[in-house]
Amino acid sequence: IRQEALDNIEEASDLKALQDIRVTYLGKKGSLTSVLRGMGSLPEEERPAIGEMANEIRKAITDEIAKKIDVLEQEALEEKLEQEAIDVTLPGRPVQVGGAHLLTGIIEEIEDLFIGMGFEVREGPEVETDYFNFEAMNMPKGHPARDMQDTFYLTDELLLRTHTSPVQARTMQQYSGSKAVKMICPGKVFRRDTDDATHSHQFTQIEGLYVDEHVRMSDLKGVLNEFAKRIFGEDRRIRLRPSFFPFTEPSVEMDISCKVCQGDGCSVCKYSGWIEILGAGMVHPNVLEKAGYDPEIYTGFAFGMGPDRIAMLKYGIDDIRNFYTNDKRFLTQYHYAK
Ligand code: FA5
């Protein structure tokens, strides 16, 4: 029995075969077990010797099976290691890393700049009331200037804001006319404009407002000049042209000088050498008064710029629709680094 069992164990090629061998010899009906069972019928003097021998054989079989299990497991492990071996010389697979959208990047850059000049960053709702979008900004119902911003109305009183200027009124109301305000507000705005290379029905604006005693037009000019140089470079100049907005008086539009033109990036202003990037002016006394500020004591300046157009100018992008059509080939060119 012993030799036969040990030979079988030697030949066994997997754990299942070993289990079968265990049953064949040591199981309830196994051959060694029946020897032990048959001991009762042996003459008494033979029993110890036979018993001892049977136990020895059981131990030999059990030990051999345990050893063989170790061997088989080791072999299985080695095979697995070989199969799963990592070839460290293979080139890595690139990891797809997300990044901020170019518009998000430029807005954050402009925010940082104004935070550095003491402005706080505020937000306002994209679904706005007719009151804040127009009336508080000195455009009562029927005012012709409302046509300058063709509007998506949701109801008679609710609309998608056409500019970030309503946040001026919201902020001043919160300060209740008794405290200086120095804030910027970035956000989405919506107009029923026909989409083309420089117009989108949804775009972004950054509003700016500074109200205090003795705020002057020269303060506005200083801040805008600093902004232009920091965003576009020291070699840029600004130009303020008289303009009209119902909520500022006087009103201006700001142009920025184009660099000496090289390549496509300059096509946006190749004719005049200047390009308009924002509207601004001194806050109209009616706007201050409606928001609870005494225009005899407080004055202020405000501006509203379009980061889409600023990004186009800064990076030489010739079509605003690139920002909104989510073509990864376009977006991934700009891993925005501040
Ligand atoms: C306004 O919206 C005023 N609220 C700005 C303002 C604020 C003036 C405070 C005075 C004081 P305007 O409609 O010009 O003004 O828009 C401001 C900027 O938004 C423009 O200079 C331009 O950069 C951008 N803009 C306007 N319309 C579009 C459009 N359809 N697509 C992309 N950008 C646009």
Image (spheres, rainbow, N blue to C red):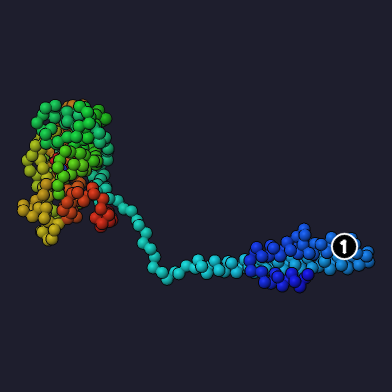
Instruction: Describe residue 68's horizontal placement relative to residue 81 as left or right.
Output: right
Observer-nearest of 139 and 233: 139
Residue depicted at x 72% and y 72%: 7
- Residue situated in front as seen by the camera: 142 or 24: 24
Q: Residue at x 38, y 63 (%)?
A: 93
Residue 226 place in picture, x, y as percent: 18, 48
Q: Residue at x 25, y 36 (%)?
A: 126
Q: In which quadrant of this rendering is ligand 1 seen?
A: top left
Q: Residue at x 75, y 67 (%)?
A: 61
The spot of residue 21 in percent (x, y) is 71, 65
Disc 1 crowd, CA 10 A, few/some/many (<14, 14-19, 20+): some
Confirm whether residue 325 shows in the render.
Answer: yes
Q: Position of residue 213 (x, y in %)?
A: 18, 33
Q: Is the CB of the residue bearing disc 1 within 8 angstroms of ligand 1?
A: no
Front in this rendered view, residue 44 or 233: 44
Q: 180 or 170: which is nearer to us?
A: 170
Label 1 sits on residue? 39
As shown in the figure, which amino acid type bears the numbered disc 1? Met
Q: Is residue 232 above or below residue 3?
A: above
Residue 136's place in the image compared with 263, above or below, is above
Check the picture and name the quadrant holding the N terminus.
Answer: bottom right
Say left or right for 17 vs 205.
right
Q: Quadrant of residue 156?
A: top left
Q: Quadrant of the C terminus?
A: bottom left
Residue 233 visible here: no
196 is higher (above) or lower (below) than 135: below
Q: Quadrant of residue 207?
A: top left
Question: At numbered mark 1, what does the secondary structure look like: helix, strand or loop?
Answer: helix
